[in-house]
Amino acid sequence: MILDKDNIYSDIEQIVSEIGTAKSAVIPILHAIQKKYNYLPEIALRRICDTTEITPASITGVSTFYTQFRHTPVGRHLIYMCNGTACHIKGSELVYDAFLRELRIKGNQDTDPEGLFTLQKVSCLGCCTIAPVVQIDDVTYGHVKTNSVSKILQDFISYQGKKVEQKTSEKKIY
Ligand code: FES
């Protein structure tokens, strides 16, 4: 997502007008920003400090205390690696490591260098009978093995291409 300063300022204006400018509004405001961008862009946080009673120290304290707040952008697609009990027993950790290798995600990063995929561990995805399970956006893959990771990513990318083609042809019909 390309962030435009004017758009961000206008988003922040709207968020502040709905939630308020008091110091106590810091958590709902951060939630609203994260909901909008999937993370907390620095420029948005600075704008909050300029237009409300909320201080940089308060934002830093809250946003680093609660783990659900992100300070880095997410990839275009989210990969949810189930780490629930059934998936864990069937080797989800090894599959997770295979995704890290395949996507060249290093250190404590969770997003590939191209910004295409963000990899996250989640608890039970509700389809334990096909463990281990991986969900990429709205597509679910079951019985995932370490050596099928590359194929899954290719399949997902090709599925995305077909969705775009379908939309284009739908536009032609109407
Ligand atoms: S534990 Fe993975 S889907 Fe239930």
Image (cartoon, rainbow, N blue to C red):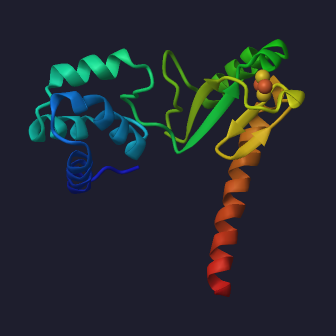
Q: Hey, which quadrant is residue 21 in on the image? A: top left
- Nearer to us in this view, 157 or 77: 77
At 64% across and 65% down in the image, what residue appears? Answer: 164
x and y, in percent, of residue 36 in the image: 39, 46
Q: Is residue 171 visible?
A: yes
Considering the image in quadrants, where does the C terminus appear?
bottom right
> Residue at the bottom extreme?
174
At 64% across and 84% down in the image, what residue appears? Answer: 172
138 left or right of 57 in image: right
> Residue at the right extreme?
129
Q: Is residue 40 visible?
A: no
At 53% across and 32% down in the image, what residue appears? Answer: 112
- Nearer to us in this view, 121 or 150: 121
Name the quadrant where ligand 1 sits: top right
Give the answer, above or below, for where 48 lies relative to 9.
above
x and y, in percent, of residue 96 in the image: 69, 21
Total numbered badges shown on the rendered structure: 0
x and y, in percent, of residue 65 in the image: 35, 15
At 40% across and 28% down in the image, what residue appears? Answer: 70
x and y, in percent, of residue 173 in the image: 68, 86
